[in-house]
Image (cartoon, grey):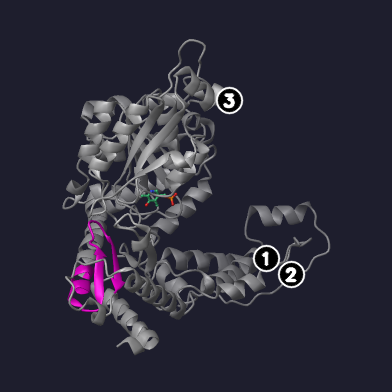
Amino acid sequence: MDTTPSLSITNKTTTRFGREDLMRIFTGPENRKDQVVIKQLISSLANGMHESLNRYLGHNLFGDYEACQKKYTNSFINEFPEMNVGNALEELIADVAPHSVNVSSPYYSGHMTSAIPYFMVILKAIVAALNQNVVKLETSGIVTAIEREVIGKIHRLVFQNSDQFYQEHIQKKRSCLGCFTEDGTLANLQALWIARNGCFPPRNEFFSIGKQGLMTAQKEYNLCKSVVLVSRLSHYSLQKIGDVLGIGNENIIRIDVDRKNRMDIDHLCEIIDSIKASKTTNILAIVATAGTTECGTIDPLHAISEICKKEKIHFHVDAAWGGPTLLSDKYAGLLEGIQLADSVTIDGHKQLYMPMTCGMVFFRQPLVSDAVIYYANYINRPESLDLGVKTISGSREANSLILSSALKILGKKGYGALIDHGIETAGLLADEILKRDCFQLVSAPVLNILNYRYLPSEIARGHEPETMDFGEDTNKLLNEINLVIHREQRKQGQSFVSRTILNLANDPHKEMVVLRSVIMNPMTTIDVLRLILDEQEQIYAANFGEYK
Ligand SMILES: *Cc1c(COP(=O)(O)O)cnc(C)c1O
């Protein structure tokens, strides 16, 4: 049976709108046809969206954005209902799907957004149907308990505390082992907000930074400045956070990276020494990244944790990308040291394969969030079970239900298999790049992200394969070549890797345009990746043939 709904749109015109119309729209499908359309759509999505969406998705991975810009310029809201629900859904699919970015294609391997398991769509629909609001117990009930349990599970994965610890804290009112946020940016903000407030405990006339602000807090503690130390490859959310926390983003100090794109510990120590010598600057936190967005590399977690311990500095690990590696028996060891963090960010919509969007942050100490408690008379009262008292977000969807079920469906083994596929396929791609004489591996994969660039064999000849420095003019040419390859491949719309600029030598003249592959779709195999490289070779030949 063909389950595809027909895509005919029959416009509905009305000139009056009464209470019965409102009830008709609000409470359930208006007519038989709507019922049929909704059932067919939902069942085709539920049975695996790849097949149903692929009927409509365009032949170009990106659709035609310019055409969309021209089309969507109507600023009037229609006075009366224009169409039935069934028609609106049909229109949505017919108009939007062909132009939406086909992130679930195996040939789309450029970003941290990818295919998700089919059942996630159904879980998301159930969450919407229940419409629980996790901000407070009175609108979330059981979800609060489930959310606390799933936070406990991931907390245990990260911090590996005892049975007794989890027995005590998972459902304990005062304890907060972590929280859900909308995304990784807000998870990092939540962590650094807590770190900042924790640096200025009450004393004398000073009550709290939340109440009196950063200026008063610094004055009380005879400080002029507060900084956060991060690596050059840290996520740009930290720049926003410097702004929001009122310390200024020039005080998010970027430590150099070593040859393997990890935070350089010697440089970190130098910076800390100079800050300490000034005596007027406070280090709110050091942020290590476990799975940098650009290279997938992991900062030396153990070494940084020791420095934090010695200097009594809050240690935050931004594992928005790499955190779920802990679910792989084979590769969890790459994150050794993460258990020593004070706080850890993990994104659900990245390598936990949840639908957009879900961030989480976890705290080693169950009471550390007391630094940011907010009460409101009408909902959240002291000693409240309401999850909203300690989170930057207010109203929030019951995302934890999705993660809770997904963990049951996939288990550690299922998630582990996804992680292993990504890491191992990235390794195969690195081998393939090394084998071809017109590509250069710029940043070898640690997890499932790698950077490379097109390097014409005429230029490579006579140089060691690891050479990155070909002089300023040649580097400019290489940047141009890689920009064009990226742009043309994107334009052709058959496959996609992303592009970034790496500065391995910490020297602006040596900025390198590189191609970035992120492998998280289990359908993205080495054969698919070989075809992507082939296409890049063809684009070079077509555009720069004269250099041959
Ligand atoms: C993706 C990412 C973030 C931010 O996540 P959003 O969910 O996009 O806000 C933060 N840090 C790292 C390392 C990331 O990869």
Does the beta carbon at disc 2 come under 8 Å from ligand 1?
no
**Whole-percent x, y for residue 376 in the image:** 58, 25
Q: Which mark is residue 205?
A: none
In the displayed structure, does residue 158 sit left or right of residue 16?
left
Using the numbered discs, state the Cα–Cα distance from disc 1 to disc 2 in whole angstroms.
7 Å
**Is 198 placed left or right of 376 in the picture?**
left
Q: What is the magenta range?
A: 429-454
Is residue 435 covered in magenta?
Answer: yes
Circles 3, 1 touching at the beta carbon (< 8 Å): no
Mark 3 sits on what residue? 376
The CA distance from mark 2 to mark 3 is: 46 Å
State the image quarter where residue 516 is shown: bottom left
Among the two numbered marks 1 and 2 on one chain, the one whose residue lies closer to the N terminus:
2
**Residue type of the residue flagged with mark 1:** Asn
Please tell me which residue is depicted at 25% across the width and 66% down the height of the picture.
468
The numbered mark at residue 84 is 1
Residue most toward the top?
204
41 above or below 275?
Answer: below
List x then y, in percent, for residue 426.
24, 65
- Which tag is nearer the camera, tag 2 or tag 3? 3
Seen at 38% across and 70% down, the residue is 108
Q: Is residue 412 magenta?
A: no
Amino acid type at image mark 2: Lys
Residue at 59%, 66% in the rendered image: 89
